[in-house]
Image (cartoon, helix red, strand yellow):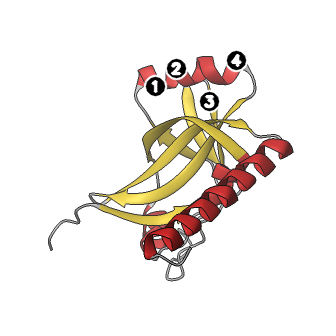
């Protein structure tokens, strides 16, 4: 059987980009069981409540929902269990310093297959205030209006 190439997205956390300002991103691997991988191959996962913590020099992904595999037996996994994150030691040390600094958190942005292995994108993020969110929405709407007006001008409709 030929080996998969490229990326196949499983789940994305769009709410995270709205609720947090992203400072840095990391591509990480996950330690998963067989039934978790089979459930992910079916394209089922939710990152909405997920976050990552650094405990005793190890990074753990928590509250990410991977539903039980439908054809699984008694060896099925718990849907919201803690999952170990695979990162380089230098990156973990950097994260320990940043998260202890205060106000910063680790949020999963997306989950995908890369060359047959499950990968995640973790973001070092800072929470936005409600006025920041409103400002971003207003800025996005104004950019959209400018693009519409420019498109009408180019087409000669004015």
Q: Secondary structure at mark 2?
A: helix
Return the disc, 4 or 2, that comes first in the chain's sequence: 2
- 110 to 98, vertically: above or below: below
Camera-nearest residue between 36 and 108: 108
Residue found 60% across the figure and 71% down from its top: 67
Camera-nearest residue between 6 and 138: 138
Residue 47 appears in the picture as rendered: no
The reply to whether the C-beta atoms of the residues labelled 3 and 1 are less than 8 Å apart is: no
Cα–Cα span, label 3 and label 1 = 11 Å
Residue found 60% across the figure and 17% down from its top: 97
Q: Secondary structure at mark 3?
A: strand
For the view shown, which residue lies furthest in the left direction? 2
User: Which residue is disc 3 drawn over?
Assistant: 54
Q: Residue 39's spot in the image, x, y percent?
A: 49, 72
Categorize mark 2 by other alpha carbons within 10 Å: few (<14), some (14-19), many (20+).
few
User: Which residue is disc 2 drawn over?
Assistant: 94
- 57 to 38, vertically: above or below: above
- 77 to 90, vertically: above or below: below
Q: Quadrant of residue 144?
A: bottom right
Return the disc, 3 or 2, that comes first in the chain's sequence: 3
Q: Residue 61's spot in the image, x, y percent?
A: 60, 45
Report the mark closest to the observer, 1 or 4: 4
Q: Quadrant of residue 47?
A: bottom right
Q: Residue 79's spot in the image, x, y percent?
A: 64, 64
Q: Report whether 116 appears left or right of 11.
A: left
User: Which residue is disc 1 drawn over?
Assistant: 91
Return the disc, 4 or 3, that comes first in the chain's sequence: 3
- 143 to 124, vertically: above or below: below
The reply to whether the C-beta atoms of the residues labelled 4 and 2 are less than 8 Å apart is: no
Return the disc, 3 or 1, that comes first in the chain's sequence: 3
Q: Secondary structure at mark 4?
A: helix
């Amino acid at each position: 059987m030929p080996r998969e190439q490229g990326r196949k997205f499983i789940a994305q956390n769009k709410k995270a980009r709205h609720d947090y300002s992203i400072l840095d991103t990391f591509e990480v691997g996950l330690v998963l069981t067989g039934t978790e991988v089979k459930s992910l191959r079916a394209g089922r996962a939710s990152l909405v409540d997920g976050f990552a913590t650094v405990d005793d020099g190890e990074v753990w992904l928590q509250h990410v929902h991977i539903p039980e595999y439908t054809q699984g037996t008694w060896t099925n996994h718990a849907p919201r269990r803690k999952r170990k994150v695979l990162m380089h030691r230098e990156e973990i040390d950097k994260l320990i310093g940043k998260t202890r600094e205060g106000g910063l958190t680790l949020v999963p942005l997306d989950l995908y297959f890369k060359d047959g292995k499950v990968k995640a994108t973790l973001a070092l993020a800072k929470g936005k205030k409600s006025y920041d969110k409103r400002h971003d929405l207003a800025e996005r709407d104004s950019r959209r209006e400018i693009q519409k007006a420019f498109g009408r001008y180019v087409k000669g409709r004015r």
